[in-house]
Image: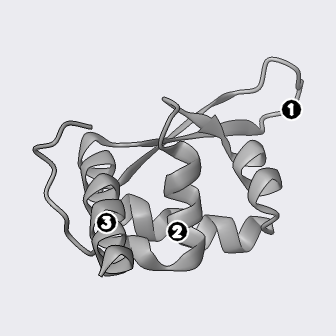
C-alpha cells in the first residue's frame, strides 16, 4: 500500500478472528476456504460467520467454483480482500502501529 493510506482504526477488522483472516489475505490475491480454516485453526462455522461479516462490509470477496478433484456438486470457496478491504486493513494496521508507538 502507498503512504496515502491514512491510519484509521476499524472496529469491524479489529475482531481477533477477522484481523487474522485479513492479515492472512494481505499478501495474496486469494486463498481457498480450507487453507484459511486450517491455517487459523478455526472451525467451519466460526470462519463462515466471520467471512459473512467481512463480505457484507465489502471488505472481502467470496468466489465459488467446482473442485477439479471431486465428482460431487461441492464447490470450493475462494476468499480475497477487495481494494476497500486492503485499504481498510492497511489503515487499521497503521492505527495500531501509532497506538503501539505512543
Looking at the image, is mark 2 or mark 3 nearer the viewer?
A: 3
Compared to residue 14, the image places residue 28 above or below, namely: above
Looking at the image, is mark 1 or mark 3 nearer the viewer?
A: 3
Find the distance from the CA under tag 1 to the CA under tag 3: 41 Å
Q: Which mark is residue 4?
A: none
First in sequence, mark 2 or 3: give its number: 2
Q: Secondary structure at mark 1?
A: loop
| Rendered location of residue 99, percent (x, y) | 32, 79
Which quadrant, please, contains the N terminus?
A: top left
Q: Which residue bears the numbered disc 2?
A: 18
Residue 85 shown left or right of residue 68 in the figure: left
First in sequence, mark 1 or 3: give its number: 1
| Rendered location of residue 55, percent (x, y) | 40, 58
Q: How packed is label 3: few (under 14 Cα within 10 Å), some, or many (20 or more)?
A: many
Depth order, front residue of 90/47:
90
| Rendered location of residue 45, percent (x, y) | 72, 72
Residue 1 shown left or right of residue 61 in the figure: left
Find the distance from the CA under tag 2 to the CA under tag 3: 12 Å
Compared to residue 38, the image places residue 74 above or below, namely: above
Q: Which residue bears the numbered disc 1?
A: 72
Quadrant in which residue 48 is drawn: bottom right
User: Which residue is most to the top?
Assistant: 68
Residue at 35% x, 67% y is 97
Depth order, front residue of 3/73:
3
Residue at 86% x, 32% y is 72
Amino acid at each position: 500500500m502507498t503512504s496515502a493510506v491514512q491510519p484509521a482504526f476499524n472496529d469491524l477488522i479489529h475482531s481477533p478472528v477477522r484481523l487474522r483472516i485479513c492479515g492472512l489475505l494481505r499478501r495474496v490475491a486469494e486463498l481457498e476456504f480450507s487453507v484459511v480454516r486450517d491455517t487459523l485453526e478455526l472451525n467451519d462455522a466460526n470462519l463462515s460467520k466471520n467471512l459473512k461479516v467481512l463480505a457484507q462490509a465489502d471488505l472481502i470477496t467470496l468466489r465459488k467454483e467446482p473442485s477439479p478433484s471431486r465428482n460431487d456438486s461441492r464447490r470450493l470457496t475462494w476468499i480475497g480482500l477487495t481494494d476497500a478491504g486492503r485499504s481498510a486493513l492497511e489503515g487499521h494496521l497503521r492505527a495500531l502501529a501509532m497506538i503501539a508507538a505512543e
